[in-house]
Image: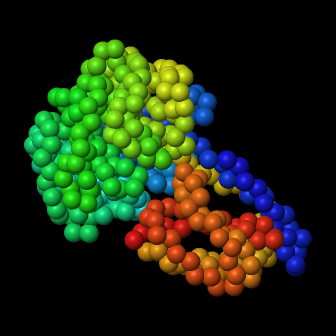
């Protein structure tokens, strides 16, 4: 996406050209190689390879797309900056970390340390472990509700899911599920959590309001399965690791019924949906490839060769927005526009030199969540959705854009 605008001040004729480009990039951790293959999602071309000191497994991407976090079996988490694909930090955690997830505001990482039976919490500003929470035996998968209030952890050795209250950092519930729960994902509206299990072909559905199992979905043979949900919340994608011929199950979330089965490469493990929802990437563990699925017709559109034993357990596709600009005058009226408080719990004020303008707010997927004309130089607005957003203020002089964080 590229957006350009011009602003002309009454004091100085100045042209300001700002370009915002969105890059969707897949980061594939190759366990046996100790490398990360970087893929441009738009072209499916390999653009870089990152060498790690250890074996990568779990992965998550910061909400703003600027950081990628990998768990490594040297008992660490490595932080990669997406702008230059460099390792920024190495953070020691518990023994044998596997699944990892980042909070909606990007401030906390939750790491399932399978041999320590704990979830380590990392402050992403300081890159320091701030807490360790005791959960069940052999925690593997982690997901966080969109409002950031709950963390769900699959306990492979206990046949349970632990629910962590993020306000208290205490386990608030323990949910019995099937044998050896592995992958886990939460719906975009936060109402449902989906759990896959090593030993059967059932996906259990957890109601997040009651923290009880509310439904079951029969699909292929899962085993070491990855699980992902489309950005619009309509489809669930599950890898069937030992279901020959090897495949991906597609579930219609509205009905919780299997809607399609897609053949992919040998031993699919990890799976992630692109932020625009147009592609699904699947790592094929034995073939050392990635299958790219076109979500419009549920067919494999490309196969990409990567490193040995690709894992990438979690969300491995980053959407990074980079802004570049031409000459910017300090006299432009846009410098007098401010949004406060930021972060906010829901209400915020736009302070502007303009009396009339249009406010459009988009989320990280570029979906419009607010669209309204406002009047007055101090306009109080409210957004009752958690997450990172872009506030676009459209005036007769041009458009001003600023990031807004809502954390209720």
x, y (%) of residue 57?
32, 36
- 157 or 47, nearer to the observer: 157
Residue at (28%, 19%) from the top-left corner?
243
Answer above or below: position of 340 versus 177. below
Query: Can residue 165 be spotted in the picture?
Result: yes
- 285 or 389, nearer to the observer: 389
x, y (%) of residue 384?
46, 70
Q: Is residue 381 left or right of residue 326?
A: left
- 323 or 201, nearer to the observer: 201
Q: How is the image coloured?
A: rainbow
Quadrant holding the C terminus: bottom left
Count of numbered circles in the view: 0
Answer above or below: position of 348 versus 61. below
Residue at (47%, 46%) from the top-left corner?
231
x, y (%) of residue 180?
15, 36
Query: Can residue 94 be spotted in the picture?
Result: no
Q: Is residue 342 left or right of residue 205?
A: right
x, y (%) of residue 184?
28, 43
Q: Quadrant of residue 394?
A: bottom right
């Amino acid at each position: 996406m590229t957006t350009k605008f011009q602003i002309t001040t009454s004091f100085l004729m100045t042209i300001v050209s700002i370009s915002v480009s969105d890059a969707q990039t897949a980061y594939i951790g190759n366990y046996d190689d100790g490398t990360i293959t970087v893929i441009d999602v738009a072209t499916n071309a390999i653009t870089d390879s990152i060498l790690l000191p250890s074996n990568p497994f779990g992965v998550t991407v910061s909400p703003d797309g600027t950081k990628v976090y990998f768990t490594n079996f040297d008992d660490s988490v490595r932080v990669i900056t997406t702008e230059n694909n460099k390792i920024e930090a190495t953070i020691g955690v518990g023994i044998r970390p596997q699944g990892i997830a980042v909070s909606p505001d990007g401030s906390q990482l939750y790491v399932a340390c399978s041999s320590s039976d704990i979830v380590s919490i990392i402050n992403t500003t300081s890159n320091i472990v701030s807490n360790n929470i005791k959960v069940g035996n052999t925690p593997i998968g982690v997901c966080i509700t969109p409002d950031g209030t709950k963390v769900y952890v699959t306990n492979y050795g206990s046949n349970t899911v632990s629910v962590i209250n993020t306000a208290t950092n205490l386990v608030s519930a323990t949910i019995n599920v099937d044998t050896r729960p592995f992958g886990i994902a939460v719906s975009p509206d936060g109402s449902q959590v989906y759990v896959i299990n090593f030993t059967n072909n059932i996906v259990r559905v957890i109601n997040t309001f009651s923290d009880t199992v509310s439904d079951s979905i029969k699909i292929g043979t899962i085993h070491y399965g990855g699980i992902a949900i489309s950005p619009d919340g309509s489809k669930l994608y599950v890898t069937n690791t030992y279901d020959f011929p090897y495949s991906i199950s597609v579930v219609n979330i509205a009905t919780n019924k299997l809607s399609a089965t897609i053949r992919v490469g040998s031993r699919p493990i990890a799976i992630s949906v692109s932020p625009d929802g147009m592609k699904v990437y699947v790592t094929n563990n034995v073939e050392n490839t990635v299958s790219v699925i076109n979500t419009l017709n549920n067919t494999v559109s490309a196969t990409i060769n990567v490193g040995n034993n690709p894992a990438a357990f979690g969300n491995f596709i980053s959407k990074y927005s980079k802004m570049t600009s031409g000459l910017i005058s300090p006299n432009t009226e846009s410098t007098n526009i401010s949004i406060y408080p930021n972060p906010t719990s829901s209400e915020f004020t736009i302070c502007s030199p303009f009396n009339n303008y249009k406010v459009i707010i988009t989320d990280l997927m570029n979906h419009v969540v607010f669209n309204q004309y406002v009047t007055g130089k101090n306009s109080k607005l409210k957004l009752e959705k958690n997450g990172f957003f872009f506030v676009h203020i459209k005036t007769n002089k041009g458009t001003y854009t600023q990031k807004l964080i809502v954390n209720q």
